[in-house]
Image (tube, rainbow, N blue to C red):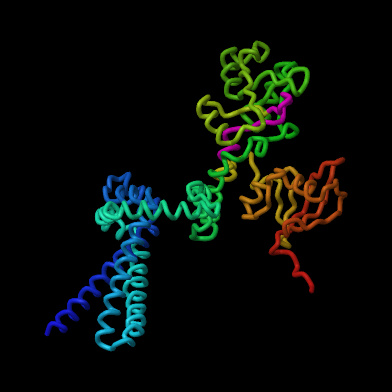
Amino acid sequence: MELDWSLIISMAAIIILLIMSAFFSGSETAFTAASRVRLMTKEKEGNKRAALVNRIRDEKDRMIGALLLGNNMVNILSSALATSVLMKLFGEVGVIYATLIMTLLVLVFAEVLPKTYAFHHAETMAMRISPLIKFVIMIFAPVTEAVTWIVRSVLKVFGVDISKVGAGSHLELLRGAIEMHEGPEQETQEQRAMLRSILDLAEVDVEDIMVHRKNVEMIDVEQPVHRIVESVLNSSYTRLPLWQGDTDNIVGVIHAKQLLREMLDVGGNIDNLDMTRIMMKPWFIPESTTLYDQLQAFRERREHFALVVDEYGSFMGIVTLEDILEEIVGEIDDEHDETMKGVRPLSNGSYVIDGSVTIRDLNREFDWGLPDEEYSTIAGLVLFESQMVPDVGQSFVFHDFQIDVIRKQRNQITMVRVKPPEELPPSEE
């Protein structure tokens, strides 16, 4: 009878240890698989359990160490008990039986089953068990600290210092999450483009999106006043730079609304207009200013218009608040704009594109993957990749895109034809 009771107690202990093993295994999966974003949201909403989970995860080494320590302890103890029981029943061969049986039980009921459940209910499970996990970490803290110290010391012997290894860039994680975003194709593509653009604001300079000086409408301030008024009223823009003597010498910016107010004040007599009262002081910014910094500057100054200059002070172009917003949300068309200006689709799937169209706009509009680190326009891509000034009619294949030069003005490529990779004919082997 004594042997029977010891057998029953041992088997009951094995079952309890397997349950504890399942708890430790599932807890590890729940805490590592739980979404940090959702938990942070719940914490901000006042969920104390979510806040506790986040605090535990902040000390990931201690958490993992305690859970692994607990898991290994109960697994080893349960295996030892099973070996002892089966050896009493079957002799030496009981070791083999214990190994096979415990491997199956641990694998199914203490590893796969709890981990599968925890993976699909990570946040819920993590919040429910967080107080108990906090207690386990406190109990095992001395041992886990000692183990961590030993591990780090051994790794240092081999030249590995894990204290200098980060968990990875949060921006990289965020970019990865954006690429994994799924949904209706067109809608999802637009959403991904917007989210990517927001992250890129701190990495893109205003020179990459500015309107180049050769495309900027400017007015000579020394013209007769009626000519200036005529130029402003005929323009599709509300703000226009004023230059004097030389186009690099920008002396002010005129706003159409301010001009109309002044005309009312003088009773419609154009000859009485004083341009020095109407024009605003120009705001010059360096071409290396990032879009993020410029967006903040626009907000602080409550202005929408800035003039871009290079390191020598030469006028390079203009950038507006709308230009930056378009980098986020895409083209903002009004009655004066064309849809994807400078791009004309052809029936064969290729596109005729002005050389001044930026790579960023093309990538965004058509979900292409053309690089733009070394250049900003499609013409710049051809010049950089070919390392030459090509002639009209020359054809290239860069990054799997076929690009044909169809128009050139002196050394400037003004128009190209681009055929995306999916439209290229299959190569013959």
Q: Relative to 202, say whether 339 is above or below.
A: below
Of residue 131 and residue 369, the one placed in the foreground of this image is: 131
Left or right of 23 in this view: 349: right
Residue 211 belongs to the span the image colors magenta: no
Position of the N terminus by quadrant: bottom left
Q: Position of residue 37 (x, y in %)?
A: 40, 50
Residue 254, quarter of picture: top right
Residue 85, quarter of picture: bottom left
Of residue 98 and residue 257, the one placed in the foreground of this image is: 98
Of residue 429 and residue 25, the one placed in the foreground of this image is: 25
Q: Can residue 57 be seen in this view?
A: yes
Residue for point 36% across, 67% down: 115
Q: Where is residue 221 in the image (x, y as percent from the top left)?
A: 72, 18
Residue for point 56% across, 50% down: 193
Q: Position of residue 403 (x, y in %)?
A: 78, 55
Q: Relative to 254, say whether 418 is above or below.
A: below
Position of the C terminus by quadrant: bottom right
Residue 311 belongs to the span the image colors magenta: yes
Q: Can residue 191 be seen in this view?
A: no
Q: Relative to 75, say whether 243 is above or below.
A: above
Residue 45, quarter of picture: top left
Left or right of 136 in this view: 281: right
The single residue placed furthest to the left in the displayed view is 1
Left or right of 179 in this view: 352: right
Residue for point 27% across, 67% down: 20
Range shown magenta: 309-325
Q: How many marks?
A: 0
Left or right of 28 in this view: 358: right
The single residue placed furthest to the front in the displayed view is 92
Q: Where is residue 107 in the image (x, y as percent from the top left)?
A: 36, 75
